[in-house]
Every structure is written in C-alpha cells, then in structure tokens.
C-alpha cells in the first residue's frame, strides 16, 4: 500500500485545538442524547422473559412482531438466530404474569393462530433483581478496567500519558454510549462485552503511539515536543489505518450478515473502532501535551560524573 511506502508528515498537533473543539461538541451531543433518550436496556439488565420458538419454514419476523403487538406485547423484541426457522422473542417484565411458563404459553397461543406449526424450544426468565446485579457488576467491570489501565500506563510511561490514555478511553466510551442511545440499540451483555473490547482496542492503538513517542523522545533531541509527537503519530499512522480498516471489514460483515442476534455487538464495535482510531491520533497525545508533558520527562537521568556537554543533551 502507498501508505506503507511514503513518509507521512501530517501536522496533527497543530490541528489539536480544532479536533478538541469538535470532540467537545460531539461529546456534548452524546451526553444530551443519553440524558434525553437514555439507554435501551435489554432484559439482561431490566429483567424479563426469553422465549425461543421454531417454525417448519423460514419465519417472517415482521409478521410475528405484528401478531404479538395485537396480543398486547408491544415491547416484544423479535430476532432470528441460528437459522431462518429459529426465532427468539424477548419480553420485558409482564404485570400480573411473573411465571415464565405462563408467559411462554400465552406467547405460544398467540402465535398458533397465524403459525400452526410453531414449536416452543426454550424459555428463560431473568428476574429484576438479577438485572440490577448485572448492571452494578457491569459498571464495576468498566470502572475496574479503566483504573487498571490508568495504573499500567502510569507505570510504563508517565502519569500524564496515563491521564491522556484515560481521557481517550472516556471519550470513546461516551461516544459509543451516545450512538447506542441515538439508535436505541438494545444494551445487553453482548453489547457490554463489545464495550470492553472497544476499551482494549482503543488502548492498544494508544499504547502503540505512546511507545513510538517514547522512542522518539530519546532519539529526536533537537525537535520540540509537538514535532516529536507529530513524527511519532505519522510513523504509526499506516499501521493504525491498516489495522482499523481490516477490523472494520470484519465488523461490517458481522453487522450485515450476522443477523439480529449479534447486530448490537457488531454496531458497538463498528462505532468503537472508528472513534478509537480518532482518539488515538488526536485525543490521547493532545491530552498529554495539554498536561505539560515534554520530551525531557522520559529522558534517562544523567549519570554521575558525566561531562557537562553530554548532560546538556538531556536537559532543556
């Protein structure tokens, strides 16, 4: 690819203020959407019933949804999974019908009028208490991951780099949550797993850039901090774009060909890869620079007895 064969020289740090302004605006919109619309929590978090049914021919999901709505199940989520004959119906908690068998029998009777060959395969009930526990544990998992990342990057690099990496991760998480809220994607355990995968992906991109910055801090002693960061981002840009595009090809294929069961998972990764690539270029390094990091912060300490001329190379 031509990106691998030419030396890039984009001035990213000179555009960091415009990028920061754009990020603040988009983050504000994402937070506004979250406040106004909220997350469309799945039954993994709210509680409810999963009814799995099978048909002797490919099922018409739209017709099944219409039949359920006519029987009073307006909030039923109908999805195909496995084959075209297998359908999963997710129902929120039903007032006055807490028993999973009772709910599944009602759904089966509602479907038998239009689909005589329908067969009940599986019934699973998730209580509201379990949903509350999953919500709490999911939030703790996310906070724990961010805390461990902060400690890891601070130990490996420098505390201002750690703050920059966490700022990039928070940027990505808020934007992904905003996209999920905007399109009302059902937030379930698979989407939570995708969120954690986005955290790992974004961090990996950021660490690659930070590694190159640290190496160039030791080599490019005559350049300014902005020049070193620009050179480092340009040197890793081809790797970042190739990795992102390859990942996007897989995720887009999953989204369009994987069916509704993993659509939320694929959508979360799709948005996460895009914003993660952006944040590793603009947000992470720009945040560390805004906190006052310089190339001298990562220079090795001068040895005792070194000549004044040699020591001056490591000091401003």
Image (cartoon, rainbow, N blue to C red):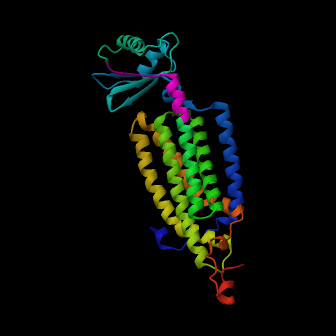
Q: Which of the two residues, 102 or 12, is positioned nearer the viewer here?
A: 102
Q: Position of residue 181 (x, y in %)?
A: 59, 35
Question: Between residues 116 and 147, which one lies in front from this camera angle?
Answer: 147
Where residue 276 appears, as percent x and y from the top left, is: 55, 53
In which quadrant of the rendered view does residue 292 lie?
bottom right
Q: Is residue 283 visible?
A: no
The quadrant in which the N terminus is found is bottom left
Residue 31: in sight, yes or no?
A: yes
From the viewer's perspective, is residue 187 above or below residue 143?
above
Residue extending farthest front: 304
What residue sits 50% from the left and 51% below the top? 200
- Quarter of the image with the C terminus in it: bottom right
Q: Is residue 264 left or right of residue 227?
A: left
Give the magenta range: 120-136
**Tally of marks:** 0
Task: Examine the image and state in which quarter residue 259 appears.
Answer: top left
């Amino acid at each position: 690819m031509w990106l691998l064969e030419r030396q890039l020289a984009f001035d990213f740090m000179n555009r960091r203020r415009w990028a920061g302004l754009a990020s603040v605006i988009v983050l504000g919109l994402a937070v506004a959407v979250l406040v106004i619309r909220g997350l469309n929590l799945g039954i993994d978090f709210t509680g409810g019933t999963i009814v799995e049914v099978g048909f002797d021919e490919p099922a018409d999901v739209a017709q099944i949804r219409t039949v359920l709505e006519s029987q009073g199940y307006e909030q039923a989520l109908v999805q195909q999974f496995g084959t075209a004959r297998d359908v999963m119906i997710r129902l929120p908690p039903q007032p006055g019908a807490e028993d999973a068998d009772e709910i599944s029998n009602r759904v089966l009777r509602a479907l038998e009028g239009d689909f005589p060959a329908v067969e009940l395969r599986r019934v699973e009930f998730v209580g509201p208490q379990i949903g509350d526990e999953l919500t709490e544990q999911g939030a703790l998992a996310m906070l724990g991951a961010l805390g461990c990342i902060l400690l890891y990057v601070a130990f490996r690099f420098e505390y201002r780099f750690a703050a920059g990496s966490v700022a990039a991760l928070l940027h990505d998480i808020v934007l992904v949550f905003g996209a999920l809220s905007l399109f009302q994607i059902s937030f379930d355990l698979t989407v939570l797993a995708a969120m954690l995968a986005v955290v790992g992906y974004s961090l990996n991109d950021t660490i690659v850039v930070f590694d190159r910055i640290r190496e160039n801090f030791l080599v490019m002693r005559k350049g300014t901090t902005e020049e070193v960061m620009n050179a480092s981002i340009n040197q890793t840009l081809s790797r970042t774009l190739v990795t992102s595009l390859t990942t996007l090809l897989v995720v887009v294929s999953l989204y369009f060909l994987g069916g509704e069961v993993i659509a939320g998972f694929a959508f979360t990764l799709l948005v996460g890869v895009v914003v993660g690539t952006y944040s590793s270029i603009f947000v992470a390094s720009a945040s560390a620079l805004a906190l006052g990091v310089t190339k001298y912060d990562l220079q090795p300490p001068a040895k005792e007895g070194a000549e004044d001329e040699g020591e001056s190379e490591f000091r401003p």
